[in-house]
Image (cartoon, rainbow, N blue to C red):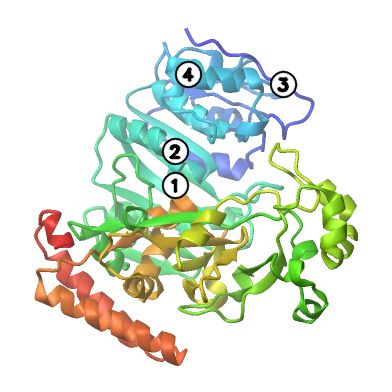
Amino acid sequence: MIAYKTLSSRNGKSLGQYMTPKFIAEFMSSLISKPQSSSILEPCAGEGIFLQVLYEKGFRNVIAYEIDERLGKGSPIQITYRDFLKIPPEQCFDVVIGNPPYVRWKNIPEEWRRLFKENEYWNKIMNGLCDLTYAFIYHAVNFLRDYGELIFICPLFWTETVHGKHLREHLSKNGSVELLINLNEAKVFEQVSSTIIIFKYVKRVKLPYVKVIEYRSKYPVTPFVIEKISSLIKNLEFHAKEPDFYIEDNSYRAYLSEQFVGGEPWHPIPPTEKIVRKIDAIPDIAHIGDIAEIGNGMVSGLDFAFKLEEGELKALNEYERSSLIYVYKAKTLERFFPSSKPIPYIFINHIASEKELEQKYPYFYQKLSRYKDKLKRRYSYGKDIPWWHWVFLRNKSLFERYNVKIFVPSKERYNIRGYFRFTLIRNEKDKPFYATQDVTAICIKKGIREGIEYILGLLNSEPVQRWIMVKGFSRGGVYDFSEEPIRIIPIPRIKWNNSKETEFYRLIVEVVREILILRQLDKISELNNYVKRLIELKKEAKILPLSAFTE
């Protein structure tokens, strides 16, 4: 029996309620392939929009649940006011359809969170980073009978995040995704900025391909958009045996992608992205996480208070000059090399008393005192820290241990520049350079024979950047380069006993060094060519033992 405590609230937002437009519900109901006599479950009925549409389409064998007793009073189908997540999956249905609530983990009541962690039914899927959508998807699948259909509209997160791995494994093991519609930045619900998807999942059926529709527009989703998506689905069904079939029409893309397998992030790959498929086909492909330490930058909590202008340095005494750190921010990064010098910052976390600060560091004291109230109000990660300290040093030791590293903005819009910025940072005279939280560092581990110039070249090359665009983590066009998304970026390792691979390695490193020395980017096309040829070579290679990479 699943014990669950009911959530009550005065406003829909805290319940995770965002009501579905009727034209969306009509479209989703049209995806049902079962007859009118089929049993249907609506686990989160809300105002009863899906129930109204199902009734109009002739479905009568419908059971509906809703947690909020104020809603759905005019529904043509009776609603049972119970918490769906309290109900054990003892009755099975042909179809589960709806719009599950979205509530972030931190906003889920403590009793629920404890249950998710401790109850055997839930803790296989739920963890401290999952939102409530994960629970609804998992529970809904368990209510399906064999060959049953799950049709949901929800945020994209669970298909990509590291903490969604176990949910994806559960779905992959028990069936297939038949249809995935990614609405990207287009608005479906007011006050919701998340990327929204509509998907159809079929239980105990193994399908070779997923029908994928992408709508890429900043304009809201309208009935016209849905009509266009419906016609694209029909096109895909007509060409279901043509895996290379592809349609691109202004803001729309439609194609067949290989079926999602296992718990890795579910990223559909269009047939046009041949280089991405070639990278994924490399039999011995490694990833950044295999060869590097990765860490996000330090957090001051009030950046402008600690930042110094060059003109201010003249006013510093000896104590103050020795208590500077030099920091790269996202705005100072470019491809291959920084666009500007590192920025001097006050760093006096070694000072324990305000009296010492005032006496020995008078300029720092004067500058920071202007922001004293704001500094005291910073989020301090649950620690009691002096107001003149940085709040979270995070990976400070990582920056100090590695003399050479690669920095990348932790959030990046590809469409602004047409590329992602991976920057080589080299310490000067044993003076380490640091990064703030808007930057992530990649530090190649000792013992990795592939040099940092090779890794830098790959990361800045067109093939790897295309892979990131297609399979990286993005929200509304903003790509995430925090630790976990960086870990999965593919890196072709070199077989040092293979003369062709070592020659491409030499050529790639040579071009990168030339770019770094001349600080000019006119060699990038040459770099792209070498990387493409290396990928082609490795795609055809046989799997060799680990010793081939370490000789």
CA–CA distance in space, label 1 to label 2 = 7 Å
Q: What secondary structure is marked by label 3?
A: loop
**Residue where numbered disc 1 is placed:** 160
CA–CA distance in space, label 3 to label 4 = 19 Å
Residue 480 visible in the displayed image? no
CA–CA distance in space, label 2 to label 3 = 35 Å
Q: Are marks 1 and 2 in contact (CB under 8 Å)?
A: yes
Q: What secondary structure is marked by label 2?
A: helix
Q: From this view, report whether residue 338 is shown above or below residue 449.
A: below
- Badge number at residue 308: none
Amino acid of disc 1: Glu
Instruction: For the C terminus, give its image quadrant.
Output: bottom left
| N-terminal-most mark, 2 or 3 | 3
**Residue where numbered disc 3 is placed:** 73
Q: Nearer the viewer, residue 71 or 528?
A: 528
Q: From this view, report whether residue 8 is shown above or below residue 180.
A: above
366 displayed left or right of 289: right
35 displayed left or right of 5: left
Q: From this view, report whether residue 350 is shown above or below residue 311.
A: above
| N-terminal-most mark, 4 or 2 | 4
Q: Are marks 1 and 3 in contact (CB under 8 Å)?
A: no
**Residue where numbered disc 2 is placed:** 164
Assess disc 3: are there few (<14), some (14-19) or many (≥20) residues with their C-alpha within 10 Å of its C-alpha: few
> Which quadrant holds residue 314?
bottom right
Assess disc 1: are there few (<14), some (14-19) or many (≥20) residues with their C-alpha within 10 Å of its C-alpha: many
Amino acid of disc 4: Asn
| N-terminal-most mark, 1 or 4 | 4
Residue at figure coordinates x 45%, y 67% from the top left: 405
Residue 148 visible in the displayed image? yes
For marks 1 and 3, give the one nearer the viewer.
1
Amino acid of disc 2: Gly
Q: Are marks 2 and 3 in contact (CB under 8 Å)?
A: no
